[in-house]
Amino acid sequence: MAQTGEDHEKAVETLTEAEAAQELAELAEKLGAANLAYHRDDAPEISDAAYDALKARNAALEARFPKLKRADSPSEQVGAPLAEGFGKVRHAVRMLSLANAFDDEDITDFDARIRRYLNLADDAPLTYTAEPKIDGLSLSLRYENGTLVQAATRGDGSEGENVTENARTIADIPQKIEGAPELLEVRGEVFMSHADFEALNTRHAAQGGKTFANPRNAAAGSLRQLDPEITRARPLSFFAYAWGALSAPLADTQSGAIARLAAMGLRTNPLTKRCEGPMELLAHYGEIEQQRATLGYDIDGVVYKVDVLALQGRLGFRSTTPRWAIAHKFPAELAWTRLDAIDIQVGRTGALSPVARLSPVTVGGVVVSNATLHNEDYIAGMDSTGAPIRDGRDIRIGDWVQVYRAGDVIPKIKDVDLSQRPADAAPYSFPETCPECGSEAIREPGDSVRRCTGGMACPAQAIEKLKHFVGRTAFDIDGLGARQIEMFFHDESLPIREPADIFTLEARDAKNLAKLRNRDRFGEKSTANLFAAIDEKRRIPLARVIFALGIRHVGENAANLLANHYSSWTAFAAALDQIEIGAGAEWEELISIDGVGAVMATSLVTAFRQEAERAVIDRLVAELDIQDAEARNTDGSPVAGLTVVFTGTLEKMTRAEAKARAEALGAKVAGSVSAKTDLVIAGPGAGSKAKKAEDLGVELIDEDAWLALIDGQ
Ligand code: IVH
């Protein structure tokens, strides 16, 4: 906790000029830190009252000594001082994450999926690499002619923060490397060893400073210091395990490429091993798990990658994860504690989510006091089909429950100890009305959650939708986070109740007599910054808009797929307007997008049909300049822009690979033949679709002709 100011205060009248200057400098620093904690980190470090006291003191000092008013005076700049954070870096090659696997079967499925995709027999040799999954944060290092020129965090995968100067302070990161291609982006993990973590926390505790919950937080907090000298004082380490942009290939295999990185002077993980097939992967997983406690740094699983890079290339990517790699996570950490209460939270789609309030307990080094209870069935001891879980044991307030954390996710409750159940503990009765707006909360057949029927009229849903809208992977507006949304939502003179309101904020403020800039916590500069940050986001990529709408079942992946498919907002909205759920060519086109199913499609169409929701969308779109999805670079592709349909059995590649390749070449792959189809690729056994193509006069070719057509692409 920062000092509040009262405890060392001398009356302003009695201060000398030097004392006042000194105090003004301290106040600028304290208020600056409080603003950052409040606006940027959403983690206030001082109470509102303490903040106000500091501001009042600052104002009093400035009033008595006007000429001491600082250039960075806190009275001028409150709010969101984000501009002077790190510069942004666009990654030349996106930084992706990994799909997760939790048990042996997930790994045999992973192997089977890859074989199916590549059309490899079950017993054909297939080599993988297996290596520890380091629990830190990923970093991309750009070397030009062997010299480190830039380091960037992952950020949202497309754009990260420029932390070059900080990265230069890490001993494992060489400034120069030997034998590298002209351009080489090395990717790997920054982490803090257990020993360094303990020492750092001991040092901080001794100085009365902040201690970190775990080495990962310590590493992240240390790398993202605005002052590189602070990073230098924090002992960070780095393992290289991948690469981004390259001017020349490193090797033919993953293992070969990693060996080259090591030869260049980068630190790579010694437990990396080549494995033949899934059984060897699982054996190596067991070995790494055995060594986990003595490694001296945190790992949270083992990463498997297809070794041959040409195969990685064929397998390619889903929208945010490679098909050729998977993270096999370690089982979660567990602890017992008491369930003190169950609260119900209402999410953006109206879902009523039960949250367990727990007596605080440490699980895997982190203090946990909340956990998800999923839904009412989970509390009652059954799954969504009515089959018992925990042998049918229900969960009651007052129970001893077992909590676990897997990775970064919200803690969950695994089990309950009936022998410790208080005699008066009653079965939990799940609310049938929304605790936020009082509307009826109903459970649709087949849905595992109960939902508030209040729609846009439910303040909880509206707020959560807005928070989602401004989230980091959606509109990501500097200075407008969850806290500010809460504040503006309840504001009477300058409310934000729907997304369009964000973009009319400045114009509405101009008409108000009481201006935002005159409010506490919003000075001249921060208000201007906020308006500028909002304006900057009027121009926004299509995928972000689709995702930001917060339509149920439409996540980031789906939004990307939809944006790539429809290319422009006009085409997307027009298609949705025409679609009839479950029928017609437009419906078929929508559900033929790989990754879009009938459930998501229904949810999308329903949202666009729902009058109030549609009006909200239209008002928003009127404020924006939505950028078309970037066309893939399909120069020279003979099939760019064509709508193609695959039918029958393909013999040279699987349907999934054929589809992915066609899409990569700029073709649209549809599920059914219509007048819009340009080309049908028919394998043996093609039935009605081939017939329909003939009837419509659509060009029909076989697989070999298709391969010849796209040869070399
Ligand atoms: S490979 C395209 N290898 O885990 C795939 N990632 O959960 C690039 N991570 O974002 C990642 N150890 O930050 C890879 N040996 C390892 C890793 C690793 C840790 C992190 C990385 C990634 C995250 C995904």
Image (cartoon, rainbow, N blue to C red):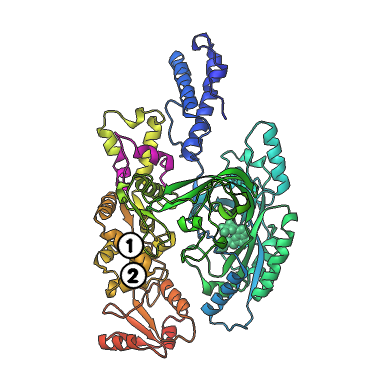
Residue 575 sits above or below residue 276 on the image: above
Q: Mark 2 belongs to which amino acid?
A: Leu
Question: Disc 1 marks which residue?
Answer: 604
The reply, left or right, for residue 456 in relation to residue 135 is left
Residue closer to the observer: 359 or 122: 359
The x, y position of residue 626, in whole percent, is 32, 55
Q: Secondary structure at mark 2?
A: helix
Residue 416 located within the stretch drawn in magenta: no
The x, y position of residue 685, in whole percent, is 40, 90
The reply, left or right, for residue 202 in relation to residue 367 is right
Q: Between disc 2 and disc 1, whose residue precedes?
A: 2
For residue 111, what is the image quadrant? bottom right
Q: Quadrant of ligand 1?
A: bottom right
Q: Does the CB distance between marks 2 and 1 fall below 8 Å?
A: yes
Question: Disc 2 marks which residue?
Answer: 590
Residue lying at the far front in this picture: please name it: 423
Q: Secondary structure at mark 1?
A: helix
- Estimate how packed mark 2 is, as few (under 14), some (14 to 19) or many (20 or more) residues with alpha carbons within 10 Å: many
